[in-house]
Image (cartoon, rainbow, N blue to C red):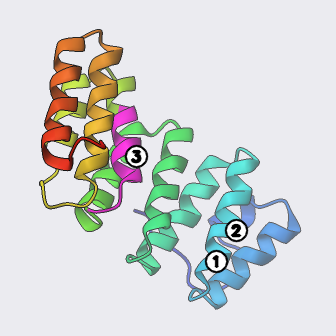
Amino acid sequence: MKSFQLHPGPGPLAARLADPKKRHLWKEILVQPAYASNILRLGGALMRDGQYPEATEVYEFGVRRHPSIYPFRLCLGAAYEHAGREEDAVRVYRQAIKTFPDRFRAYVRLEKLYRRGGSIADAIRLYRAIPAANPIKEASYLRLFQIHARLGDFETAITVLQEAIKHYGESY
C-alpha cells in the first residue's frame, strides 16, 4: 500500500478531489483520523461517483489506521474490484478472512471473484476449509450447495445438504 500524507494540504488525493465537500472531508480525516465514520462516508461517496482509485486510497488509509475495523477491508476489496484490480481484491479478502475468520461476507466476495475468474475449485476449497467449530460453517454449506447446483452437479449438491443436516439437524 502507498504511504499517505498525515496532514491536510495539497497531496495526491486532495488534488484529485474536485468536489469541495469531499476535499474538506478528506482534510478532516487527515486531521482527525480516529473518526472512522468519516472514512466510510468519503469512501462511499467516491464509490458512488465512480472514483474508484480515490476510494481505494481512502480505504487503504482506513485499513492502515484502523486494522480492526472489518468494513474497511470489505470496502477496500470492493474498491479494488471496481478499479479492475482483482488480484488486490483477492489479497484483501484473504487477509480479511485471516483476520476475521468468523465474518462471512469476505468469504462470499472472495468466492464470487474465484467463480468470475473460473476458479470454481478454489471457491469450493474456500468453504471446505472453514473449521467445523467456526460459527459460519453452517452458512458455508448453503454456498457449497449453490456452487454445485450451478455447475449441474446435483449429486454433490445433495451430499452437501446431507452433510449440513447431519451436523445441524433436520431443520437445516
Task: Give the left or right position of residue 111, taking residue 73 as reference.
Answer: left
Q: Quadrant of the C terminus?
A: top left
Q: Is residue 53 visible?
A: yes
Are the residues at dot 2 and dot 1 in contact (C-beta closer than 8 Å)?
A: yes
Q: Nearer the viewer, residue 51 or 72?
A: 72
Q: Residue type at mark 1: give it.
A: Ser
Q: Is residue 83 visible?
A: no
Rendered view: 98 above or below 124:
below
Q: Residue at x 32, y 31 (%)?
A: 114
Task: Please provide percent x and percent y for residue 5.
Answer: 56, 78
Q: Residue type at mark 2: give it.
A: Arg
| Res 37 label | 1
Q: CA distance from mark 3 to mark 2?
A: 20 Å
Are the residues at dot 3 and dot 2 in contact (C-beta closer than 8 Å)?
A: no
| Res 41 label | 2
Q: Residue at x 59, y 50 (%)?
A: 53
Q: Which residues are magenta?
A: 102-113
| Res 140 label | none
Rendered view: 82 above or below 150:
below
Among the two numbered marks 3 and 2 on one chain, the one whose residue lies closer to the N terminus: 2
Task: Please provide percent x and percent y for residue 167.
Answer: 14, 47
Give the labeled residue for mark 3: 89
Among the two numbered marks 3 and 1 on one chain, the one whose residue lies closer to the N terminus: 1
Local crowd at mark 2 within 10 Å, few (<14), some, or many (≥20)? Answer: some
